[in-house]
Structures are given as C-alpha cells and as structure tokens.
Image (tube, rainbow, N blue to C red):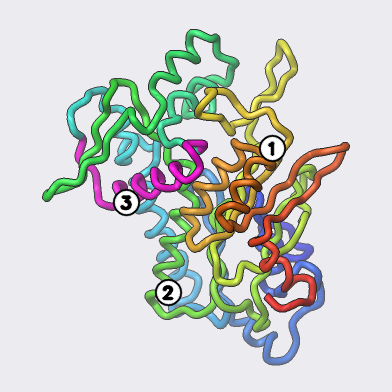
C-alpha cells in the first residue's frame, strides 16, 4: 500500500484515496466527514494469488473481524469451485479427470461456466475457458516451465481448445461436465476476481450495506458514497510506470469495473529477447503481440467485466472499440504509441469520467 493518497494497487485498478474520496485531494477530511471516515471499516487479505480490499464507510457491524470473515468465506467458496492450483477444488478435479464420462459439479461452478460461455460468445471466443492447455504449454500454469513451444506442441494443444470440446449438462439431480476429448482442461482464472467481487458485493447488499468499495485484484464493485459522502473514485493504472501511477480516474457509479493488462505477467525468450505475455489468443494459440497494454470495462457485474476485458485485450484497441460502439459498451483502452501511453474511451465510457472533471455523472 502506498501511503501517499492511500492507494491500493490491484492489477490495473487503484482504489484511489479510499478515505479521502478522490485521487486529486490529499487533504484530510473535516468535521462530520472526518467522524464518518474514522468509523469506516477497512480490511485487506489475500486470495487467488493476489490481494483484496474492502472499505465500508460508517463502519460494519462486528468491525474488521466480521467483515474479513464474510469476505474470506465468500472468496474461499469461489476458490474451492474454480481453482486449478488446489487439487481439491472442483475445477482442478475435473481437469485431472482424464476421461469422457460425466463429471458432477456444483450449481455454483455450473453457473460460472455458463456465464463465461455467454460472455465468450459475445466476443466471438476471444476469451475461451478451454485455454488451459495453451496456458500450461507457454508456462503460465502451475508447475509448468515458461518456454516458447514448438509448432507440433502448439498444434496438439490447440486441438483441445474450443467451446465445442466439452459439454455442460443440466440434469434433475446435479449439473454435469463432460469432456469430448481426453486432455481438455478448463481455466476460469479470467473471471475469478470478478466472481469474488460480485459474491462479496451481493453479501453486503443482503445485509443492507448502502456504501462500500470492494476490490479483488483487477476487479471492483462499489455502491453509494465514500466516507466523505462523495462518489467513489477509482484510478486506472498507468501500465508504463513500475509503481502504479494513476493514468486516469473514474467514478464507477455503482457499476462493476475491471481491467486486464498484458504488461505484468510475461517472460523473455533468452534466445531471441522477445517478450511473451500471459494474454493468449485462443484462435492462434500464441500470446498477443499488439501494443494495447490494458482494457478497462464497466458493466453491471464484475464477472461480466472480468470476462470481457480479457477477450477485448486479445483483440486489441481498434477492434475492441469497434465492438464497444456497436454494443454501447463502456470500455477504456491504453495503447503504447509514439513512445508513450495513449488512452481512448468509448462513448458509453464518458459518463464515468465526467464526475472527475467537475461535471454531472
């Protein structure tokens, strides 16, 4: 955590000045706002190999201990369903099930898979949850060395990728997953953070919490106002700086926000010096090579934004913006051009920037 501005960096999003209410304002709160800020309950923790943070202005019943317990329970439930690293998790067990016989899963996992497939179809499969064999092949999975694979290896892995390589069946008793080919592996890492943020937000909503900010790495959910009674502000990270400077600031307006970036998780081939990102195009089987560094999406749910930002990043800024304008989607891209980063907002995204510029949201 960086003390100046009290910023929490989370995978492309920065929960800006959570106590102070805006990245531009470094002065402390005063009067009644100071009292409310002092009562705010704030917790941090680890999940999915990264960090989460929650702020509840005005305090949470039971304080930090109760809020952290709620968060950990919700996140652990998601992890136990979708983790590919924990051999006891549902998805890890399905991936290890090297057979084409039906595999029973929970309604939770079935729902996450179903929503992921729906979002994938919206962007023509640019995000694909069967990409697991390619993730492992390039060394971005558990216990796999990072390397540039040969053409034979790449072709073999690509034969296991595609939504047609498995089936989700709904039966009267329980959902079933069926591999159509041995070796098929699913990877829901791209929606895990969003699903976690949604689960915590839903729990807070059920408890009647009117104001909160939840960040799980690059995905966030917020509602209401910050401790100063102002709209929440969230910063989008400048991907060209090593210490998480804010590139631009937005007001989420009770919507979900997530950012996917190609600039943190990569390796360099010792022979050629080329950079290879963990953002892999499921159609080519190779890491993307364009100059789009990050894509931010705003929508109703963090699972949705988390699924779309990855696929739109695979496409690159030009194609992503063309799609966003056709579908009235709020996206923001950062590209590296002429030696520096350039930001670009879709028309639907502009409303989330106006509040930071003195205008009405």
Q: Give the range drawn in magenta.
A: 103-126
Residue at numbered disc 2: 205
Graded by Cα atoms within 10 Å as few (under 14), some (14 to 19) or many (20 or more), the crowding at tag 3 reads: few
Going from N to C along the chain, the mark reached first, 3 or 2, is: 3
Residue at image position (22%, 25%) is 100
- Look at mark 3 in the image and give the residue it sits on: 111
Q: Which of marks 1 and 3 is nearer the N terminus?
A: 3
Which sits in the foreground, 100 or 326? 326
Residue toward you, 25 or 66:
25
> Mark 1: which secondary structure?
loop
* Camera-side residue of 354 and 154: 354
The residue identified by callout 1 is 263
The nearer-to-camera label among 1 and 3 is 3
Compare marks 1 and 2 and give the one earlier in the sequence: 2
| Residue under the point 76% across and 65% down | 5
Image coordinates of residue 159 in percent, x first then y, are: 40, 19
In this rendering, the answer to whether 242 lies above or below 15 is above
- Tell me which residue sits at (50%, 71%) in the image: 64
**183 to the left or right of 172:** right
Is 324 magenta? The answer is: no
Residue at 12% in and 50% down: 172
- Above or below residue 219? Residue 285 is above
Q: How far is disc 1 from disc 3 in space, using C-alphas? A: 30 Å
In 3D space, how far apart are the residues under numbered discs 3 and 2 (Cα atoms)? 20 Å
291 to the left or right of 260: right
Q: How crowded is mark 2: few (under 14 residues within 10 Å), some or many (20 or more)?
A: some
The answer to the question of whether label 1 and label 2 lie on touching residues, with beta carbons closer than 8 A, is: no
């Amino acid at each position: 955590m960086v003390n100046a501005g009290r910023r929490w960096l989370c995978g492309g999003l920065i929960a800006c000045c959570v106590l102070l209410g805006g990245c531009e304002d470094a002065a402390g709160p005063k009067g009644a706002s100071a009292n409310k800020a002092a009562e705010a309950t704030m917790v941090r923790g680890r999940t999915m190999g990264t960090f989460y943070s929650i702020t509840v202005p005005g305090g949470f019943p039971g304080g930090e201990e109760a809020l952290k317990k709620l968060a950990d329970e919700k996140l652990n439930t998601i992890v136990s369903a979708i983790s590919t690293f924990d051999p006891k998790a549902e998805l890890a067990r399905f991936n290890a099930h090297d057979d084409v016989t039906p595999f029973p899963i929970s309604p939770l996992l079935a729902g996450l898979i179903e929503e992921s497939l729906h979002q994938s179809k919206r962007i023509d499969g640019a995000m694909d949850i069967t990409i697991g064999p390619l993730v492992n092949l390039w060394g971005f999975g558990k216990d796999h060395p990072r390397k540039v694979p040969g053409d034979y290896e790449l072709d073999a892995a690509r034969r296991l990728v595609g939504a047609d390589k498995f089936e989700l069946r709904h039966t009267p008793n329980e959902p079933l997953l069926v591999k159509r080919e041995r070796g098929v592996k699913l990877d829901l890492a791209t929606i895990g953070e969003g699903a976690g943020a949604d689960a915590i937000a839903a729990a807070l909503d059920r408890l009647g919490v009117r104001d909160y900010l939840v960040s799980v790495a690059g995905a966030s959910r917020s509602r209401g106002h910050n401790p100063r009674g102002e709209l929440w502000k969230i910063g989008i990270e400048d991907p060209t700086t090593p210490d998480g400077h804010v590139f631009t600031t937005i007001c989420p307006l009770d919507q979900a926000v997530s950012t996917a970036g190609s600039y943190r998780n990569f390796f360099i081939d010792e022979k050629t010096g080329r950079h290879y990102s963990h953002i892999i195009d499921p159609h080519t089987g190779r890491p993307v090579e364009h100059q789009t560094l990050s894509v931010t999406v705003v929508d109703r749910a963090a699972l949705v934004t988390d699924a779309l930002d990855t696929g739109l990043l695979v496409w690159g800024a030009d194609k992503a913006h063309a799609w966003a304008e056709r579908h009235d989607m709020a996206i923001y891209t950062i590209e590296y051009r002429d030696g520096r980063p350039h930001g670009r907002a879709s028309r639907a995204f502009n409303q989330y920037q106006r509040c930071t510029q003195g205008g009405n949201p």
